Image (spheres, rainbow, N blue to C red):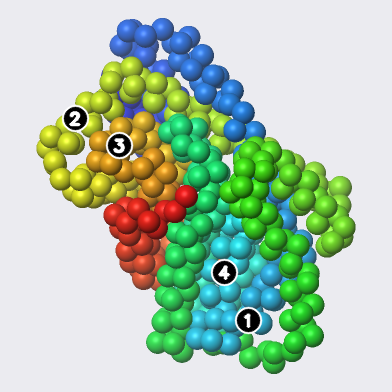
Amino acid sequence: MTALIIGLFIVAALASIPIAHALVLASVSALLLMGRIPVDLAVQQMISQVQSFPLIAIPFFMMTGALMVSGRLGQSLVNLLSMMIGRVHGGPAQVGVLSSTIFGGVSGSAVADASAIGSMLIPWLKKLGYPAPFAAGTLAAAATIDILIPPSIPMIIYALVSGASIGALFVAGILPGLLMCGGFMLVCYIQGRRRNFPRDTTPFRWDAFSKQLLQAGPALMMPVLIIVFLRFGIATPTEVSVMSTLYALLVSGVVYRDLTLQKLRHAAIESGISTGVVLLIIMASSIVGWIVTYEQLPALFTRFATETLQSPWLIILAMNLIMLAIGMFIDLPAAVLLLTPMFVPLASAVGMDTVQLGIMMIVNLSIGLYHPPIGTTLFITASIAKVRIGDVVVELIPFYVVAVGLLLGFAYLPWLTIH
């Protein structure tokens, strides 16, 4: 039945049907054709999968990001970072990488990051004289750091399926996120120096720097507070998500004073739509996962891999190659939901911690966000920059090299995912 689902899903995907709808169509069609499992059980599985308390964190974190990323915060942060590193080689591009890293502690969504940060920085980089494809590529890659720095929506989804602790995943993602940030900033520096990209020539002024630091300070505190509350068990991830939304309302309304009814309404609608998309993917993927488990495919897959490859490092390499291939054609949340039931038993068989597997999976699948043919952040930034996808992909090659190199580190060095 699993083979039939895969075949039907490929046909639906090639027909440009959205991933969630394609999964539902493929699963239900396979159940009807095979006639071995009642369809109403699949519907019950879809509904029960989203009746989970930790999922409440998703709309609240998305609401927080929608409130904080827009408005005066974004411009204050860009100005602050530009004052700090805009004068070094590739400095303005490094501002984009750092901005995405900091916003990662606010929104938890790579797509939201690419849209918000890209809209601000790509026109600025082009105005400074940076090639539009390079600006788009930098922001497309940097946006994926967002899902490593807590809070992270994909980590919540992975925890739902794997049973791993959301708090442990959030803490484990900090070092990989910072390493990815450092690696991408190094690419910007090397490219800026080699190609003599323009730098920010605005004179440095301590009074202006202090002013921008004070303006950005309340927002910069949010990721710190999230980590402190989770690390020391002060609150659960769901409780932290609610508190972060209240904090965002307070900061936006009192500190930045740019909270209006229109902005609040837009944030509520945007977070509601985004949450609906994620929940629909979870519901659709749950049917496939349920059928796969019913057919005992994870156990069969684990036995086949361990008997065929035998060596743990070869098994980990094979897992990464499969994820890289899947991530290029299936959106990240759906890929996490589909692959996690298969890989958790296999990871346990080779002695890999569930949290380490989660970080490895999210880093791996995030590469697909800025790699064709799906490339969500790639298409967003290329559209903002008004350039061809092929030109952006050429500029992304060094970022791919860094990302894959760090991915291998996260896969084979457990101490890089401290939790």
The local crowd at label 2, few if under 14, some if 14 to 19, many if 20 or more residues have their Cα within 10 Å, is some
Pointer 4 or 3: first along the chain: 4
Pointer 2 or 4: first along the chain: 4
Pointer 4 or 1: first along the chain: 1
Q: Residue 298: percent from the left, percent from the top?
A: 28, 28
Residue 79 in sight from this viewpoint: yes
- For residue 387, side relative to residue 4 (left or right): right
Residue 273 in sight from this viewpoint: no
Pointer 2 or 1: first along the chain: 1
Q: Label 3, on which residue?
A: 348
- For residue 265, side relative to residue 393 (left or right): right
Q: Residue 411: percent from the left, percent from the top?
A: 32, 53
Give the Cα distance between marks 4 and 3.
Answer: 35 Å
Q: Label 2, on which residue?
A: 303
Q: Which element carries disc 2, helix, strand or loop?
A: helix
The one nearer the camera, 227 or 144, is 227
